[in-house]
């Protein structure tokens, strides 16, 4: 079965760029849409964007100016970059596949923005 | 932007009793293809969200049949026919018609 795992730095300084990678195992990244979703501590879920295996993307308009996603099909990975971060970007970041609904999800990765 | 509004935000339920969560969209989620672009998710304590229902009324693989989704257009409902202790968690509706936006979440707790 398909599993997803987020990785990256857990601490990012304000104004710098957050970078995360999602590794997909148990299946190929060469189909469906691969998403990033975040959840600030104690708050609800916010969709960030998706990418497919050809590199086509769709971003949340509220974050679009700061978001870049990329895909590496040879490694079965996709990545997120979020620039000019502030404390408001502190959140658990999830990667998830979208087929019929979002699923499966990664376990989530806490990124803290702090100096 | 499509705004999703859930009610109630807190739902205490006795085990074995039914439960119902409402979700209202600011825009019609019924596409011309006849599908409602509305999902339901549950986030159990300490876990990632998991899909319960997609396209308004389709149970995801492995989801017990005590969970059901209904509704069309702007009003949707998630029903649990008999709540079990393992159903504790945060329940979210989400629209998938224009990008994706989630409701605020409904916290189901056991009385």
Image (cartoon, coloured by chain):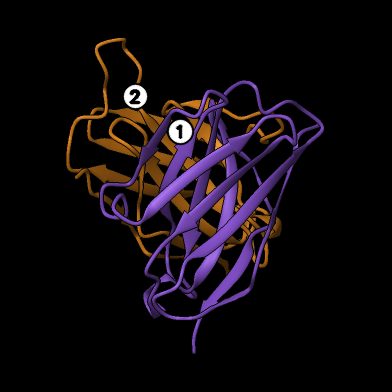
Residue A105 located left or right of residue A88:
right
Is there any visible trace of residue A36 in the rendered image? yes
Label 1 sits on a secondary structure element that is strand
In this figure, which residue is indicated by the disc labeled 2? Answer: B36
Which residue is found at the position 28% from the left and 33% from the top?
Answer: B98
In this figure, which residue is indicated by the disc labeled 1? Answer: B69
Give the drawing colour for chain A.
Answer: purple
Q: Residues within 10 Å of mark 2 (few under 14, many from 20)?
A: many
Q: In the rendered image, which quarter contains the C terminus of chain B?
A: bottom right
Residue A108 vertical placement versus B71 (above, below): below
Which residue is found at the position 75% from the left and 36% from the top?
Answer: A75
Is there any visible trace of residue B18 in the rendered image? no
Q: In the rendered image, which quarter contains the N terminus of chain B?
A: top left
Give the drawing colour for chain B.
Answer: orange
Residue B102 vertical placement versus A70 (above, below): below
Where is residue B47? Give x, y as percent.
67, 60
Which residue is found at the position 45% from the left and 73% from the top?
Answer: A16
**Pointer 2 indicates a residue of which chain?**
B
Q: Residues within 10 Å of mark 1 (few under 14, many from 20)?
A: many
Residue B10 located left or right of residue B33:
right
Q: Which mark is residue A58?
A: none
Dot in front, 1 or 2: 2
Location of residue A94 by image quarter: bottom right
Which residue is found at the position 31% from the left and 10% from the top?
Answer: B33
**Pointer 1 indicates a residue of which chain?**
B
Decide which of B64, A83 is in the foreground and name it: A83
Where is residue A101? Give x, y as percent.
52, 32
Decide which of B9, A71 is in the foreground and name it: A71
The answer as to whether the residues below labels 1 and 2 share one chain is yes
Where is residue B3? Give x, y as percent.
23, 49
Location of residue A2 by image quarter: top right
């Amino acid at each position: 079965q398909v599993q997803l795992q987020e990785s990256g730095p857990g601490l990012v300084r304000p104004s710098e760029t957050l970078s995360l990678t999602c590794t997909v195992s148990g299946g190929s990244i060469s189909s469906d849409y691969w998403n990033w979703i975040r959840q600030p501590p104690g708050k609800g879920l916010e969709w960030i964007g998706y990418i497919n295996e050809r590199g086509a993307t769709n971003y949340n308009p509220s974050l679009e100016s700061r978001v870049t996603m990329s895909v590496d099909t040879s490694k079965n990975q996709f990545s997120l970059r979020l620039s000019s971060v502030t404390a408001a970007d502190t959140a658990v970041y999830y990667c998830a596949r979208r087929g019929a609904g979002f699923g499966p999800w990664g376990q989530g990765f806490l990124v803290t923005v702090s100096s | 932007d499509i705004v999703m509004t859930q009610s109630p935000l807190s739902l205490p339920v006795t085990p074995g009793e039914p439960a119902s969560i409402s979700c209202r969209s600011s825009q019609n989620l019924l596409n011309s293809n006849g599908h409602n672009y509305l999902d339901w998710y549950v986030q159990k304590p300490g876990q990632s969200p998991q899909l319960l229902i997609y396209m308004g009324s389709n149970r995801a693989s492995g989801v017990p049949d005590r969970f059901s989704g209904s509704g069309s257009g702007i009003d949707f409902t998630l029903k649990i026919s008999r709540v079990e202790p393992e159903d504790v968690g945060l329940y979210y509706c989400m629209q998938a018609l224009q990008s994706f936006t989630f409701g605020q979440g409904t916290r189901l707790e056991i009385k």
